[in-house]
Image (tube, helix red, strand yellow):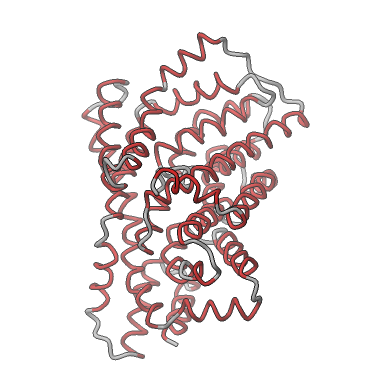
């Protein structure tokens, strides 16, 4: 009953155009004051409890590391590396785009950062090679989904903090699905290039490939440092964020020398601004999650799903499809704090391993960022390509269907998300 009342007030305020944080806090206060005898001090208390999480401390560090690496000339070096490796294939410029996004995903943990860093270089190149602006935006927006799937992933950190899951194991669980999505996108680009008659880039000779690998070596060292340190037990996922910041500073200031000490205040401000936006939403979700718990929302949702079907896979598929569709209307961070506390407990009911379920839902949440009509990632890439959202949406469907297929495959094949964590962190 409490959860239902909250949902009604929350929906009314959201429809009225109130910001998400205000909707959560005000709806919570209305329900608490009018329908319960719980004191109002619970609101700031639950917000503090939600933020008092060691895994959440990783968010500002990975955001800052991504900002530093983005501004430190890394994106250009990674594009050159991708060009040397796959540019000679048909439709090479599109394949370079996807591969560069895959590699950059191992640095930033944010799809938005990846699109901004790689898109500024690749969108003009795609258009110059004969691709339409809509196609360039669709490709960048779709590949941007790799950022929160291939570790490190800020989305997975938020998810893990909410449900007491291991962020390190979630990182490892996202590697194979992320690679499979990226390789599939490259195959789609190759087939479409053949159909559109778009040729290859000049082949880079082996000495050029070696130089490209050497030039991007420091960038490639970031994911090795983060994942290697976590797997070997040198540091936790949160401590890995600190190590990533130190590494990014050393590379940017002293090795590549493309940022200076004078740039640091601006970079710190950018990272602090992004972190604050996320943390305010997470804090406001603390009281929301508590209300859902006392209202037994997971049990209510479980009964509703089982009333539709008693087949666990179909029920799980409904959850995944719901998150993908919801992502077409709402920010990913907001989706996590609103629905993860309710939907994550259902994994055990449906017979799924907790880690498999967490990684699968995280991928569904990210795919929502490419799903029309809102599509956060697509909106950003369309703005960069100076294309309309309608033009971009026309070209996004092959990539979107492939991502959905891999997401469903995560439900059907446990090893896709569990093999690497079981092998490296048993």
Side of 200 relative to 40 (left or right): right
Q: Is residue 85 left or right of residue 110?
A: right
368 or 132, nearer to the observer: 368
Residue 283: x %, y % from top left: 31, 65
Task: From the viewer's side, name the closer residue of 101 and 235.
Answer: 235
Residue at 32% across, 23% down: 258
Residue 213 placement (x, y as % from top left): 45, 19
- Which quarter of the rendering shows the N terminus? bottom left
Q: Residue 397: image x %, image y %?
A: 68, 48
**Quarter-of-image position of residue 181:** top right
Vertical comparison of 347 with 295: above or below: above
Residue pictured at 49% horizontal, 39% vertical? 115
Residue 109 visible in rendering: yes
Residue visible at 60% across and 21% down? 87
Q: Position of residue 333 (x, y in %)?
A: 43, 58
Can residue 371 be spotted in the picture?
Answer: no
User: Is 210 situated above or below 74?
Assistant: above
Quadrant hosting residue 36: bottom left
Q: How many marks?
A: 0
**Which is nearer the eye, 268 or 256?**
256
Q: Is residue 112 left or right of residue 303?
A: left
Q: Residue at x 47, y 73 (%)?
A: 16
- Quadrant of the rendered image containing residue 382: top right
> Would you place residue 327 above or below residue 210 in this image?
below
Is 305 drawn above or below residue 159 in the view shown? below
């Amino acid at each position: 009953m409490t959860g239902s009342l909250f949902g009604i007030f929350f929906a009314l305020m959201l429809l009225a155009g109130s910001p998400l944080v205000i909707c959560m806090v005000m709806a919570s206060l209305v329900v608490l004051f009018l329908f319960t005898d719980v004191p109002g001090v619970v609101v700031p208390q639950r917000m503090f409890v939600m933020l008092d999480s060691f895994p959440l401390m990783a968010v500002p560090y990975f955001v800052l590391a991504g900002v530093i690496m983005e501004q430190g000339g890394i994106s250009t070096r990674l594009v050159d590396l991708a060009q040397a490796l796959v540019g000679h294939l048909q439709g090479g410029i599109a394949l370079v785009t996807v591969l560069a996004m895959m590699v950059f995903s191992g640095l930033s943990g944010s799809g938005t950062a990846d699109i901004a860093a790689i898109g500024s270089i690749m969108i003009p190149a795609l258009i110059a090679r004969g691709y339409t602006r809509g196609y360039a935006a669709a490709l960048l927006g779709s590949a941007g989904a790799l950022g929160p799937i291939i570790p490190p992933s800020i989305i997975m950190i938020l998810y893990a903090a909410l449900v007491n899951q291991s962020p390190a194991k979630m990182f490892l669980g996202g590697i194979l699905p992320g690679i499979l999505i990226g390789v599939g996108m490259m195959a789609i680009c190759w087939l479409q290039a053949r159909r559109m008659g778009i040729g290859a880039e000049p082949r880079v000779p082996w000495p050029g490939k070696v130089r490209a690998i050497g030039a991007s070596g420091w960038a490639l060292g970031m994911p090795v440092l983060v994942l290697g340190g976590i797997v070997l037990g040198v540091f936790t996922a949160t401590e890995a964020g600190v190590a990533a910041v130190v590494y990014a500073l050393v590379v940017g200031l002293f090795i590549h020398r493309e940022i200076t000490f004078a740039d640091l205040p601006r970079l710190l401000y950018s990272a602090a601004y992004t972190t604050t936006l996320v943390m305010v939403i997470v804090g406001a979700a603390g009281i929301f999650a508590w209300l859902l718990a006392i209202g037994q929302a997971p049990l209510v949702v479980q009964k509703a799903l089982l009333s539709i079907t008693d087949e666990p896979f179909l029920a799980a598929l409904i959850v995944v499809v719901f998150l993908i569709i919801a992502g077409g209307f709402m920010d990913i961070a907001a989706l996590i704090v609103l629905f993860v506390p309710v939907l994550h407990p259902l994994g055990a009911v449906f017979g799924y391993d907790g880690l498999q379920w967490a990684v699968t839902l995280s991928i569904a949440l990210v795919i929502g960022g490419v799903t029309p009509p809102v599509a956060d990632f697509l909106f950003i890439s369309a703005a960069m390509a100076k294309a309309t959202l309608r033009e971009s949406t026309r070209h996004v469907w092959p990539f979107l269907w492939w991502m959905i297929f891999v997401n469903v495959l995560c439900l059907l094949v446990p090893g896709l998300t569990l093999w690497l964590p079981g092998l490296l962190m048993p």
